[in-house]
Image: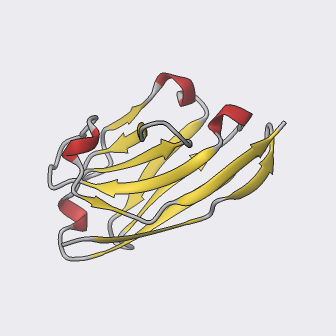
Amino acid sequence: QVQLVESGGGLVQAGGSLRLSCAASGRTFSSSAMGWFRQVPGKERDLVAAINWSGASTYYTDSVTGRFTISRDNAKNTVYLQMNSLKPEDTGVYYCAATRRYSIATVVHEYEYWGQGTQVTVSS
């Protein structure tokens, strides 16, 4: 079992930066691939970035490549999403999620555990 708590969301102007954190509890965090998803009203949750169990492998959706960086610190049971050069279209609720897999998962149903979400709003 893994419990996830996100923090770091907020309101920022376009071009600004935010760093999201996801604190995990549970013995399996260090062996779990993790992901950050974004959801806007009326739409499904979309994968933004993912990272494998060790942090050696990462995935980004095209729209954030070069601007966002996912990382993890297994000693602190925390995964991060550094978001730079933010755009209004990055606005949404960001969810941290964990899978039982070691390797990166890119499909929403492969993630078994979810945080409560944190709102990110980018103003133009």
Q: Which residue sits furthest left? A: 101
Residue drawn where x is 44% and y is 45% of the image: 37
One can see residue 27 in this view: yes
Q: Which residue sits furthest front? A: 42
Left or right of 63, for residue 110: left
Residue 114, placed above or below residue 33 = below
Residue 4, placed above or below residue 35 = below
Left or right of 42, for residue 47: left
Image coloring type: secondary structure
Residue drawn where x is 39% and y is 73% of the image: 76
Front-most of 3 and 55? 3
Residue 54: % across, % down: 26, 52
Residue 69: % across, % down: 52, 42
Front-most of 21 and 46? 46
One can see residue 17 in this view: no
Residue 123: % across, % down: 81, 42
Q: Which residue sits furthest top? A: 62
Name the quadrant of the N terminus: bottom left
Left or right of 38, for residue 4: left
Residue 26, placed above or below residue 33 = below
The number of numbered discs placed on residues in the rendered structure image is 0
Residue drawn where x is 55% and y is 42% of the image: 40
Tell me the quarter of the picture where residue 24 sits: bottom left
Left or right of 27, for residue 55: right
Tell me the quarter of the picture where residue 5 sits: bottom left
Residue drawn where x is 33% and y is 45% of the image: 51
Front-most of 55 and 45? 45
Residue 3: % across, % down: 31, 73
Tell me the quarter of the picture where residue 29 sits: bottom left
